[in-house]
C-alpha cells in the first residue's frame, strides 16, 4: 500500500479524534516534543494520543509513526490557522525566536507554532523553515556559496 495514503489516513483520523475531544493543542504539543527527541516518551501521554498509538500498534503501523506525526502536525496547524515554523540555530536564542515569531505573525496573520532545534554544524547564524520555504542564513551555507563561487571562477575542484 502507498505509504503516503497510510500516513494521511491515520493523521486525519488523529486530527478528527482530537477535534472531537478538544485536545488538539495538547496532543500537537506532545507530538512536537516527541519528534524533537525521538527516543524519549513523555510520562503522561494525552489520552487521545495514548489511544492512537495503541491503535497503530494493533494495526501494525508503528513503522509509520514519525511520518504520521509530521503529517498530523502539518494538518493540525492548517486546521487551527497556525503557521508551523522550524528554527534551527547553533545555540538557543530567545531573542531571535521572539523576532521570528513577531515577523511571521505580522506577515501571515496567523499565530505561530515554533519548533526550535540546535545544530552546531551551522557554525553561526540560523535556518528558518516555513510553509515549504527555507531561509538559510547560516555561516555554513555562506561558506558553501563561497566555495562554489571559487570553484566556478577557477575551474577546478577544491
Image (tube, rainbow, N blue to C red):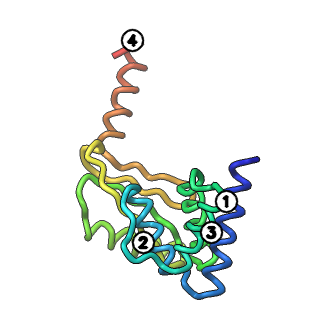
Q: Earlier in the sequence, mark 1 or mark 3?
A: 1
Secondary structure at badge 1 equals loop
Q: Which mark is residue 75?
A: 3
Q: Position of residue 2 (x, y in %)?
A: 74, 47
Q: Which residue is mark 2?
A: 103
Q: Quadrant of residue 73?
A: bottom right
How many residues crowd mark 3 within 10 Å: few (<14), some (14–19), many (20+)? some
* Residue furthest right as drawn: 1
Residue at 25% across, 62% down = 92
Q: Marks 3 and 4, Cα distance to the nearest angstrom?
A: 46 Å
Q: Which mark is residue 156?
A: 4
**Residue 25 versus residue 77: which sits nearer the camera?**
25
Dot 2 alpha-carbon crowd within 10 angstroms: few under 14, some 14 to 19, many 20 or more: few
- Name the residue rendered at 51%, 67% in the picture: 84
> Which tag, 1 or 4, sits closer to the chain's start?
1
Query: Vertical placement of 63 versus 24: above or below?
Result: above
Image marks 1 and 3: residues in contact by CB distance under 8 Å: no
Please indicate whether residue 122 sits to the left or right of residue 51 in the image: left
Percent across and percent down for residue 148 are 40, 26
Amino acid at each position: 500500500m502507498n505509504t503516503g495514503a497510510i500516513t494521511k489516513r491515520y493523521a486525519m483520523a488523529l486530527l478528527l479524534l482530537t477535534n472531537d475531544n478538544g485536545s488538539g493543542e495538547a496532543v500537537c504539543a506532545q507530538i512536537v516534543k516527541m519528534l524533537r527527541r525521538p527516543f524519549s516518551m513523555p510520562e503522561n501521554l494525552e489520552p487521545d494520543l495514548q489511544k492512537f498509538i495503541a491503535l497503530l500498534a494493533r494495526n501494525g503501523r508503528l513503522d509509520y509513526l514519525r511520518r504520521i506525526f509530521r503529517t498530523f502536525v502539518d494538518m493540525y496547524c492548517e486546521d487551527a490557522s497556525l503557521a508551523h515554523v522550524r528554527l534551527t540555530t547553533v545555540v538557543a536564542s530567545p531573542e531571535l525566536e521572539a523576532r521570528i515569531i513577531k515577523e511571521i505573525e505580522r506577515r501571515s496573520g496567523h499565530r505561530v507554532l515554533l519548533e526550535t532545534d540546535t545544530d552546531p554544524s551551522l557554525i553561526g547564524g540560523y535556518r528558518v523553515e516555513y510553509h515549504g520555504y527555507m531561509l538559510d542564513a547560516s555561516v555554513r551555507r555562506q561558506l558553501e556559496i563561497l566555495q562554489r563561487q571559487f570553484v566556478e571562477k577557477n575551474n577546478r575542484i577544491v
